[in-house]
Image: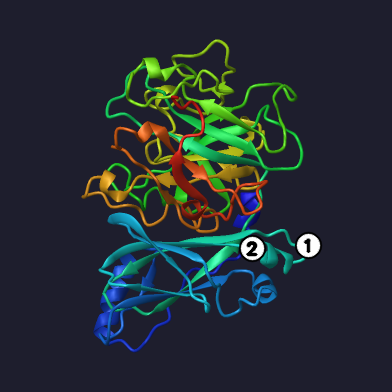
Amino acid sequence: MYGSVGGRERRRARPTHTATSAALLTILSLLAACEPDVSLVVPRPAQGEPSLRVTVRLEDPDLAAALAWEDGVPDADFWLIRQEDPPARELRSDSAGQVEVMELIGGTYWIWAQRRLSEAERAALGERDVRVFGGGDKISVASRELDELELLLATEDPGSLVLTEFAMALPSSLGPQDGSRFIRVANDSQETVYLDGHILGAGFIYPIDSPNWPCPVYEQFRSDPGALYASHVLAFPGLGHEYPLAPGASVVIAVQAIDHTEVRPGEGYLDLRGADFQLPSSIRNPNVPVMVDVGLYAPTGGWDRIFPLDLQPFLARPVDIDGLERRLDPHNRYRLRFPMELVLDLATLIHPIRFYHPSNPLCPRMLPPETDRLEGMFGTYPGPPDANQFSVQRKTVPGGGRHQRTGTTMADFFRGPVTFGTVP
């Protein structure tokens, strides 16, 4: 459960300083003040070729000792992306757990890594059933010559109900029947879970610093490590034992459970008539159960348009909505506070920065690192013509049987062909 991850003490990726002039340190301090929660990499005097050296380590010292990785994590998959200029660069740590990145220019960088264990490595951990580590951070690069830093990887946290797929590409213009989108939920536990009453919510996340939604004003809804905030909330129908989900099984929740191939022929839209549930949109399939709106407000434009990629979907245990704390935001709208002990799973998904207006930079963080170490930059809007045939999917762990959950959206998900409603 993500609540347990949120309660664990974490260390951030941290720079190791070298001798730097007082004037340069003053400039860098000002840069850091502009972007709180972003680790600052201090440049050193130019000598030799520019590089960023990252040592990948485990958060858990006992597991590091058991694997003989005290000095660093070898053969870790490592990615780096300049926030302003995707795509990502993919590298691998050496035998000492180090990664060297060449030819960087100034800007904000996202770094993330994962290490998947072999069968022999898993056996070395004895009864600890750990199969993958993952983590990520953001760093502010002020020069081409950089110092060293550390990236800590968290141990996977196997879940019960988990979000495993988001097919949410949007057309350039939305019509009343353009809900060719879905979310998939799977049962990773060893027991049957009854979906009845479980919560599917859209957490509050507005990723850009705009005049109407300034980052500092809404920081209270982003920086609370003990809770998520939401106004748009759905519950699975049923009175307790009507909708069982067996171990390893999954369900699809469609925005509109209709055949969208007839709405926009030839544009790669999906036939979602076989969905297990549908949102309470204006166009419904009478043969598919409807999710129950238990939130404070309906989304702008109705449920036909909810769950674009710049939202934060989450799953939570059944709860009495009336018993949750409500907080008023600066726009005089209330947000429900969902304590992390209720939250079963979440993902933080935004568009690449080029999607947003250049005068509105991204907020430093969407969530505190205890909740999500690094959000996922997976959006495609405005996307290519075949965008409807791709989705954001959670990785599975080595050995199968469950999905990857390291509390790092950017490391735990990938883009791939949709797994439901495809056109032959």
The residue singled out by tag 1 in the image is 127
Look at 40% across and 46% down and name the residue there. Answer: 378
Say which of 109 and 294 sits in front: 109
Q: Secondary structure at mark 1?
A: loop
Instruction: Report, in whole angstroms, how far the alpha carbon at label 2 lies from the one at label 1.
Output: 15 Å
Binning the other alpha carbons within 10 Å of mark 1 as few (below 14), some (14 to 19) or many (20 upward) gives few
List the single residue furthest toward the front. Answer: 424
Q: Which residue is mark 2?
A: 118
Label ID, residue 390: none
Disc 1 residue type (three-letter): Glu
Q: Quadrant of residue 143?
A: bottom left
Tell me the residue at 35%/35% (across/down).
Answer: 387
* Residue 290 at x, y percent in the picture: 57, 19
Q: Residue placed farthest to the left in the image? A: 359
Q: Nearer the viewer, residue 379 or 75?
A: 75
Residue 159 screen position, x and y as percent: 66, 47
Q: Residue furthest top?
A: 286
Relative height, residue 173 to residue 34 (above, below): above
Q: Residue at x 40, y 26 (%)?
A: 305
Q: Position of residue 168 (x, y in %)?
A: 42, 33
Specify the quadrant of the image occupied by residue 238: top right
Mark 2 / mark 1, whichever is N-terminal: 2
Q: Are marks 2 and 1 in contact (CB under 8 Å)?
A: no
Viewer-proximal residue, 280 or 256?
256
